[in-house]
Amino acid sequence: MFKYNPYIPILQKTLFLFETVNCYDLIFQEIKTMDCSAESIELIEGDCLEKIQECPDAFYQCCITSPPYWGMRSYGEVQRKGEIGNEEELEEYIHKIVCVFQEIRRVLKKDGCLWLNMGDGYTSGNRKTRAMDKKNPARAMSKRPPTPKGLKPKDLIGFPWRIAFALQADGWYLRSDVIWEKPNAQPESVKDRPTRSHEYLFLLTKSKKYYYDWESIQEIGVSGTMRNRRSVWRIPTKPFRGRHFATFPEELVRLCLQASTIKGSRVIDPFCGSGTVGKVCQDLHRSFLGIEIHPEYVELAEKRIKGS
Ligand SMILES: C[S@@+](CC[C@H](N)C(=O)[O-])C[C@H]1O[C@@H](n2cnc3c(N)ncnc32)[C@H](O)[C@@H]1O
């Protein structure tokens, strides 16, 4: 007998789908069984907050993602309804991020986790515009948001931690901060503080107990023996020859996937960009759903994943 499958509306709207077995068979098979042995890669264009609402509860093992940082970058040629990152107020930005991750928590399995990448930024110092990035004219947002209440010009905003605490208050278990050290970070012209060369990666979980395979991501310790991976990950950024910028290095995604998923697990990235998480999922035989608001990036991610 036909049973309503909440995943089907998503499939119907899927722009790009390829898999190793018939898709509907796979979905029914997946709904019935806990583990799946075939992987699918899907990309959906749209506002992630709306699209995740169409996903079933407790379906994904892991979310790996990097939302747009507040007031930093314009991604598309035109601003899209629902696009995150250009809010006037910092509180509004944090509220939207919390709402997206509330939905992510709902769609994660009980033992699932979220790897959330966030970089920090400074208040505008009362400057209202931002100089154009000569190397990448589309990169920097032309206007700067006003200095948030309680902060001063030139203050470090600390929004990775503001978001981490907001998510913790909303019910997530905040399990670890990882410093992603970028040995090849962009130089800055500043002379009154150190040049920033790191971002954060937060490990957040839905439950107190969760799947984490520490052995699969061990590192070599000072004595030459293997040890539990430490919380500073030194990974160079990799330039990507597409139009997108702020892409994840594949190595970073690989570590998250190995620690938090097994072959066949389902992974979601609601801010998919150029599709790095999808590409690594394909390489490591995980199923993937990516949501991206700008059609040009959906196309880019599709070409990138297909070409790999
Ligand atoms: C930091 S980038 C992600 C880069 C990605 N990790 C990669 O490796 O390419 C953030 C992306 O979120 C997208 N975005 C912004 N608001 C969105 C929304 N409401 N729904 C879906 N995507 C959104 C932007 O267009 C941008 O491509």
Image: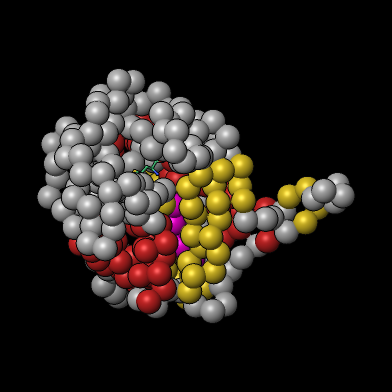
Q: Quadrant of residue 267?
A: bottom left
What stretch of residues is rendered in magenta? 113-117
Q: Decide which of 169, 67 is in the foreground and name it.
A: 169
Q: Decide which of 206, 68 is in the foreground and name it.
A: 68
- Answer above or below: position of 92 versus 238: below
Task: Identify the residue at image location x=82%, y=48%.
Answer: 222
Q: Decide which of 113, 68 is in the foreground and name it.
A: 68
Q: Quadrant of residue 229?
A: bottom right
Task: Identify the residue at image location x=13%, y=36%.
Answer: 78
Q: Decide which of 216, 11 is in the foreground and name it.
A: 216
Residue lying farthest to the front in this orientation: 192
Q: Is residue 115 magenta?
A: yes
Residue lying farthest to the top in this orientation: 134
Task: Identify the residue at image location x=36%, y=33%.
Answer: 245
Residue 288 in sight: no
Overall secondary structure of the magenta section:
strand
Q: Quadrant of ligand 1?
A: top left
- Answer above or below: position of 280 versus 147: above
Q: Is residue 127 magenta?
A: no
x%, y% of residue 167? 38, 70
Task: Identify the residue at image location x=86%, y=47%.
Answer: 224
Q: Quadrant of residue 106?
A: bottom left
